[in-house]
Image (cartoon, rainbow, N blue to C red):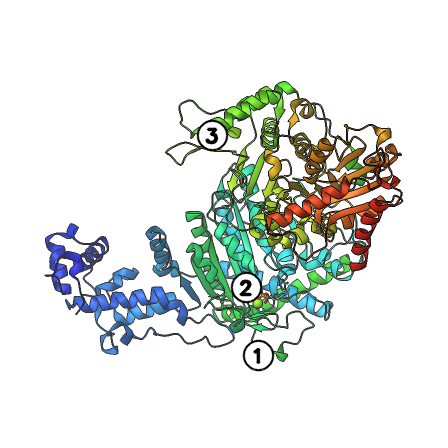
Amino acid sequence: MDDFSYLGGSEINSMEQLYQQYLNNPEALDKSWQHFFRGFEFARVNYSEPAVTHVDLDKEFKVLNYIDAFRKRGHLFTKTNPVRARREYYPTLDLENSGLSEDDLDIIFHAGNEIGIGNASLRRIREHLMQTYCGSVGTEYMYVRTPERVSWLQHRLESVQSKTGFSPDEKKDIFGHLIKAVGFENFLHRRFVGQKRFSLEGTETLIPALYYIMERGSELGIEAFFLGMAHRGRLNVLANILGKPYENIFQEFTAAEFESNISLGDVKYHLGYCSHISLPNGREVSVNMAPNPSHLEAVSPVSQGLARATIDHQFKGDFTKVAPVLIHGDAAIAGQGVVYEVIQMSELSGYKTGGTIHIVINNQVGFTTNYLDARSSTYCTDVGKVIKAPVFHVNGDDVEALVQIVKMAMDYRQTFYTDVFIDILSYRKYGHNEGDEPRYTQPTLYRAIARHPNPRELYSQQLISQGIVTAGEVSRQQKSFDGFLEEKLEISKTLGKVTIQRFLSETWKSYKHAERQDFDKHFPDDITVELLQFIGDKINYLPDDRKFIDKTVKLVEDRRAMMKAGKADWAIAELLTYGSLLYEGHPVRISGQDVVRGTFAHRHASHVIEDTDETFTPLKYVHQKQAPFYIYNSPLNEYGVLGFEYGYALAAPNGLTIWEAQFGDFSNVAQVIMDQYLSSAEEKWGLMNGLVLFLPHGFEGQGPEHSSARIERFLILAARNNMQIVNPTTPANLFHLLRQSVKRNFRVPLVIFTPKSLLRNHKCISTLKEFAGDHFREVIDDQDVDVKEVRRLVFCSGKIFYDLLARKEELKARDVALVRIEQLHPFPRNQVDAIMHKYDNALVTLWVQEEPGNMGPWRHIWHEFKGFEILPIFRQPSGSPATGLLKVHQISQEEIIGKVFKKCVCELNRPYCGLQCPDGSQKQDILNQYRYFGEKH
Ligand SMILES: Cc1ncc(C[n+]2csc(CCOP(=O)(O)OP(=O)(O)O)c2C)c(N)n1
Ligand SMILES: [Mg+2]
């Protein structure tokens, strides 16, 4: 017997008693039971037919359990796979598994009310459940934790009204989209034989699905869509959804050259596109397909960032106007970790985009890998359950079911502003690409596929049998579309070089691509000390009516005192940069792990009010008319967040967008974004991007993974004007660098190696005069020298300068010039040349770095010094960037510093005579190291 004691005491142990309890005192019962019995009563009183003749509440509950089983597990028993049988799952939905039997089929149950069909026979209930949960659509949603969402879905799925089909005209419209989707692929197949296009064949219903997402979305207020997708079916989507001219796509199959300043270009199925589409419902939507690399799913976070920036800036934070649509492959969505990252970010205030429509082209194979080898989860979409998103698995052959579901998904998104998944179960007509033989690896599946009619044929048969179209009409429509494509093909032959449409051209219309000389122009910063003090007052302010911890109060007081003394450290420089840009109308967004306080507790962009979790962010109160300031601690990932910020910066070039790594060492987790977007997007797709990376870097004995941001890796990616790579050493230089990057008329990714210990180094301080009226310095020369007396010219970059400076001051070595190369790329050659000539009495020129010889800037720097002899000093080349033993670190650091200032063995009058030493030991030492480096590599 069931145990009901938890409901109302030990005396309740049957359904009848529970019902009595309800009649006596309904409020004493749990809400769901109240709800059930209310329905039961309502049905008993209001429906005379069919009458419930039994009072077998136990059985009623069994029927309810039966209904529940369908809701929870119905998706496992659907007819969603168009080409093969599904796996078997247990327990089944047989009546017996709910304690019912065939004998109960004709009994009328109140439980029918639960699914909106009133009192009904078990037979009718079963039929309704089978149709709702086990037909062409399998829905997973019972794990959704918000009851309101569950009832919404239940109502939409189960109610009889929602099952009314499409009108003949609607069906003809749907068919029209299939004519285009199938016709386009067939045409490419015939006209460009054997060429790679990653055909959509097998999942052509994607095209009507996307169309109706747009149409329904537009009716619900969406004005902009951001699409991210991979290779499969992309040409079809570009042509038939975004309206990219067919002739341009055909031209890309044959043309050999790109126009404009795109130097390398990319394959056609990676290109992005933007369009404004006028829909038959009279609305207009902008649809933007982000360019994507081969790296599957890398585009997902980028699309999210694009959408969020558009929401923030174009729609003033209104999520209802913009929707991202991500189209995944079944293998990629299951396998690529960045999908998890993006989904984990989807509900966070810094990254939310109001719900993404995820669509999976589930052709049950990834290249040659069967789905059984591609995942452990039941469904490829199971990652969606992380955020309890509903998932609809739809048979890709059933276009009407799919269209209905996408409309429902769009309604859900526009009601609850959260993600939703549509998994289109389909197949892949050919191999991975059109030249590939799928029968090597999937012979039985491909036997079935070979016999399988395409969705256009299936739907035309259906419409013909319903008398909605005739066979003649179908054939005429197909021929007409073919003829149209033939005309476009002819046009394509006259077009010349391929042009790449500028992505988000309206947003980028006032920016130009960078040329080398642009980096030599200094942005004349006319900011005044008065304005800096005004901004300083704002950023160093704590409201009197709030209480902050003592350390916060002291921090702000110290900052005030420093500014009053006309100085600024690194943290103040940052805040002044943001404050001044906001004041001048440039939005600022910073995200990364623990960025609000700052990993090294230097930034404190917000202050937490004591005894509450509220925060006060002074940068939001610089001026009434200021631009918005956003700062978000990110979730603990790099790939997803960096991709997101790249997309954000792409849609907001007027702002300053910064991603900060916790330590630069961790940035390599996001290597795909650096390789595939940051460094190469301009050459591949003509994309500019002003994203700034803050990468804490410096050898301070903190171990192999808390020392190096891998300067060498960024320099290896640097070519021509694709990135600006900077290792600034003064607060003022950081200020100018960041402000310049926003003020100029071009954008390139800006990689900045940022300090750790220097944040608290009393030498690493600038005067406010260096902020006002100055400009960014690519090279900082040594002012504390007698130029003609300089015997050693020492070039370095970054934090080691301060170690060298300390020794130089200790030794009062005015014959050693310490020159900082702040900008590593583009290399400031003219300035460096001038310095080489300036110190013409120098006997030796050194490059000094704290990184091992195979890392840091050296290998990239040395050929910039062509024509000059320059000897390097570095840590011994090694596989691991740094030691974990503080003592070992200190010894090797001392060795480097010691070599630079090594006292001459000759003991001449000049203690630092460099190569004047008769036995040449100084030079020999350095040369030995140099040779070692040369031999090893
Ligand atoms: C990150 C990454 N790893 C590997 C590949 C190579 N690759 C290209 S397509 C593909 C299979 C993709 O399968 P699926 O996601 O199901 O998409 P489909 O091609 O079946 O539409 C693989 C492994 C890649 N492009 N990106
Ligand atoms: Mg696949």
Judge from the rendering whether residue 695 lies leftward or rightward of residue 1; answer left or right.
Answer: right
> Hey, what amino acid is under mark 3?
Thr
Residue contact at pointers 2 and 3, CB within 8 angstroms: no
User: Which quadrant of the view contains residue 849?
Assistant: top right
- The residue wearing badge 3 is 552
Task: Categorize mark 3 by other alpha carbons within 10 Å: few (<14), some (14-19), many (20+).
Answer: some
Tell me if residue 255 comes above or below residue 645 in the rendering.
below
Label 1 CB less than 8 angstroms from ligand 2: no
Check disc 1 and give the amino acid type. Answer: Arg
**Residue at mark 1:** 451
Question: What residue lies at 62% left-to-right and 63% top-to-bottom?
Answer: 232
Chain-order first, disc 2 or disc 3: 2
Q: Position of residue 367 (x, y in %)?
A: 61, 70
* Residue 445 locus on image (x, y percent): 56, 78
Mark 2: amino acid:
Gly
Q: Earlier in the sequence, mark 2 or mark 1?
A: 2
Residue hosting label 2? 335
